[in-house]
Amino acid sequence: MRRATPSPVTDLLSQVSRSFYLSLRVLPRPVRPQIGLAYLLARTTDTIADTPLLAPEDRLAALRLLRERMLGSHTRPLDFGALAREQGSAGERAILERVEESITALNDFTPDDQACVREVLRVISSGQELDLTRFAGASEQNMVALRTDAELDDYTFRVAGCVGEFWTKICLAHLFPRAPLDETQLVADAVRFGKGLQLVNILRDIPADLHQGRCYVPADRLAGAGLKPVDLLSPDTEPRFRALYREYLERAREHLEAGWRYTNALPRGQVRVRLGCAWPILLGVETLNALAAGNVLNPQHRIKIGRGRVRRIVVGTLVRYPFRRSWERLFRVCTAH
């Protein structure tokens, strides 16, 4: 019999992502193992991609080795002990040291679930590999930017939009396989949901990414506003950047609105899944509101939603859920703040 949760997931997730671990706990038991393990392995690939003390080519080699192991292209055990020692976080050290436990846990799943987990990890790791290749040699003195909105859209799909598709397929298979849903529309909105969350992160983290020489605001859109990527290093550029920046804030909001439509298309009896979707959407909207009100180019003023506001959102969803109209207005209420 399959274990309720693959062995490495519970303790490792609690170390590397307390917020996701809490969200995972609200999900129904039949989908927790698959979603939890996929997230854990994605965090493992992300940790490798983001290890700054290693040269990009060494990170690429390790990332490709891990991807091949996850996809079953080879069965040779991985040893990332040396890479683990480069991590400043105990949790990130642990997920690299115990990577074989995580990969072995895939065997607890049905062949269909294994295929779903492997596919989402393949797409995510391809986005991380693309990032490492694209930004190799990037620095504040050698700024590299995405070229077009198409590249930005492709990146947000690879690292987050594909997760919405994965989440939907797992939930359809295990929670409501016979629900009368428009699956094509559901998956399309799920992809936009993931893209929206990633775009919120990109729009919030512009100064930190610029410090590493990475500019996710496309160069052609900046040029249209009379700007170059290096100009965004100065907070004084914000008034000239504001109109373009607000376009991207609106795009992110529209993606999250698709995520809210997705949430409300799910069977109403799936309370846990709906809550697991609603919380990141509403927190994303709160973040967009805060970004619209401040100078996003100021590296000393990183936007972060406080724990008090997070608790109010969680409580608000629980209180409103029994009342359909009140619940459905939540997105509009948060957007108006």
Image (cartoon, rainbow, N blue to C red):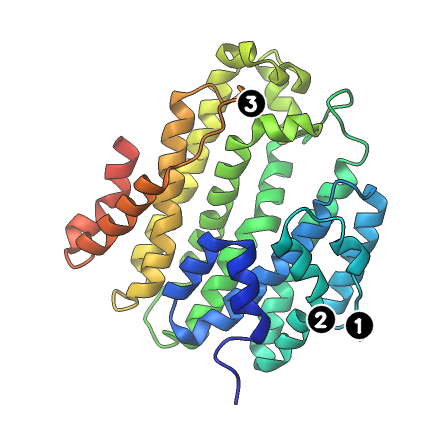
Residue at image position (40%, 32%) is 288
Local secondary structure at mark 3: loop
| Residue at image mark 3 | 299
Q: How crowded is mark 3: few (under 14 residues within 10 Å), some or many (20 or more)?
A: some
Q: Earlier in the sequence, mark 3 or mark 2?
A: 2
In this rendering, the answer to whether 320 lies above or below 214 is below
Camera sees residue 257: no
- Residue 252: horizontal and vertical position, in percent? 45, 37
- Residue type at mark 3: give it: Pro
Is residue 241 positioned above or below 314 on the image? Answer: above
Most extreme residue toward the bottom, as rendered?
Answer: 1
- Vertical arrangement, residue 80 with respect to residue 329, above or below: below
Report the front residue among 115 and 312. Answer: 312
Question: Total label count?
Answer: 3
Rate crowding at label 1 as few (under 14), some (14 to 19) or many (20 or more) other CA atoms within 10 Å: few
Q: Is residue 257 left or right of residue 5?
A: left
**Identity, as a three-letter code, of the amino acid under mark 1:** Pro
Q: Residue at x 42, y 20 (%)?
A: 294
| Mark closer to the chain start, 3 or 1 | 1
Mark 3–mark 2 Cα distance, whole angstroms, equals 38 Å
Residue where numbered disc 2 is placed: 100
Given residues 177 and 8, the one toward you in this image is: 8
Cβ–Cβ under 8 Å for marks 3 and 2: no
Camera-side residue: 304 or 165? 304
Left or right position of 76 against 92: right
Identify the residue under disc 1. 77
